[in-house]
Image: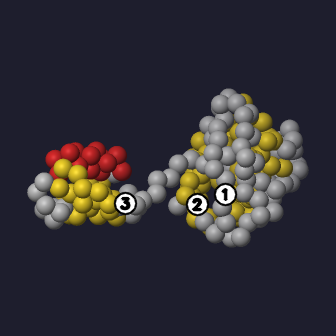
């Protein structure tokens, strides 16, 4: 997208944009804003500014990742519950029990061949909670099984060619704990 705007008006907008995105650097010839990618805006004259920019913002793709209620979540059985603002798992000796969201319940569904970042908080676990993340039907594993201790965790993954576009978590035998603040976004 290219457009000409008055420099004084555009300068205010760019400064606000820079503050919103993170880091703002200005030189006489160019303006740079950095938030994972570099955005360059060249100054085309004293009274005008040429902007030719395209960038993607990322938002949480999970609906109700703070577990205010059971809305948008499917719990396979009683090993998973939602209460007190968290998703809770109590080991009952059963493997592969899941809590998940259908693609139609997500803000936006997973896509094939795409990079993602998943952030979540684990609590109420004395030894950690062993989790695996996969597509809703468990057809494709997205994040291999690992033990997550109390605290906030961030994992990245890339989908291959997937056939199901929802997401689910399953906990493996021998662990108990709570999950909260789930954020899934493009990476």
Q: Dot 1 corresponds to which residue?
A: 110
9, 38: nearer the viewer: 9
Q: Dot 3 corresponds to which residue?
A: 1
| The image quarter in which residue 53 lies | bottom left
In space, the residues marked 1 and 3 are separated at their CA atoms by 28 Å
175, 133: nearer the viewer: 133
Residue 59 seen by the camera? yes
**Residue visible at 59% across and 52% down?**
184
Q: In this rendering, is residue 51 above or below 73?
A: below
In space, the residues marked 1 and 2 are separated at their CA atoms by 9 Å
| The image quarter in which residue 136 lies | bottom right
Crowding near pointer 3: few (<14 within 10 Å), some, many (20+)?
Answer: few
Disc nearest the viewer among 1 and 3: 3
Spot occupied by residue 2 in the image (x, y as percentages of width and height): 32, 60
**Residue visible at 65% across and 31% down?**
68
Is the C-beta separation of discs 1 and 2 under 8 Å?
Answer: yes
Spot occupied by residue 183 in the image (x, y as percentages of width and height): 58, 48
Spot occupied by residue 60 in the image (x, y as percentages of width and height): 56, 47
In space, the residues marked 3 and 2 are separated at their CA atoms by 27 Å
Find residue 86 and name its label.
Answer: none
**Residue visible at 56% across and 54% down?**
185
Crowding near pointer 1: few (<14 within 10 Å), some, many (20+)?
Answer: many
Q: Earlier in the sequence, mark 1 or mark 2?
A: 1
Find residue 116 and name its label.
Answer: 2
């Amino acid at each position: 997208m290219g457009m000409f705007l008055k420099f004084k008006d555009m300068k205010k907008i760019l400064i606000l944009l820079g503050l919103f995105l993170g880091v703002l650097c200005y030189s006489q010839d160019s303006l740079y804003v950095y938030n994972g990618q570099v955005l360059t805006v060249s100054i085309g004259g004293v009274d005008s500014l040429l902007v030719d920019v395209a960038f993607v913002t990322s938002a949480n793709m999970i609906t109700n990742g703070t577990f205010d209620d059971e809305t948008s979540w499917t719990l396979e059985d009683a090993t998973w519950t939602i209460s007190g603002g968290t998703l809770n798992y109590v080991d009952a000796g059963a493997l592969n029990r899941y809590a998940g969201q259908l693609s139609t319940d997500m803000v936006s569904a997973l896509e094939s061949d795409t990079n993602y970042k998943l952030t979540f908080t684990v609590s109420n676990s004395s030894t950690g909670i062993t989790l695996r993340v996969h597509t809703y039907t468990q057809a494709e594993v997205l994040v291999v099984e690992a033990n997550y201790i109390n605290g906030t965790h961030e994992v990245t993954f890339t989908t291959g060619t997937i056939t199901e576009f929802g997401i689910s978590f399953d906990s493996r035998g021998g662990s108990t704990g709570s999950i909260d603040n789930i954020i899934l976004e493009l990476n």
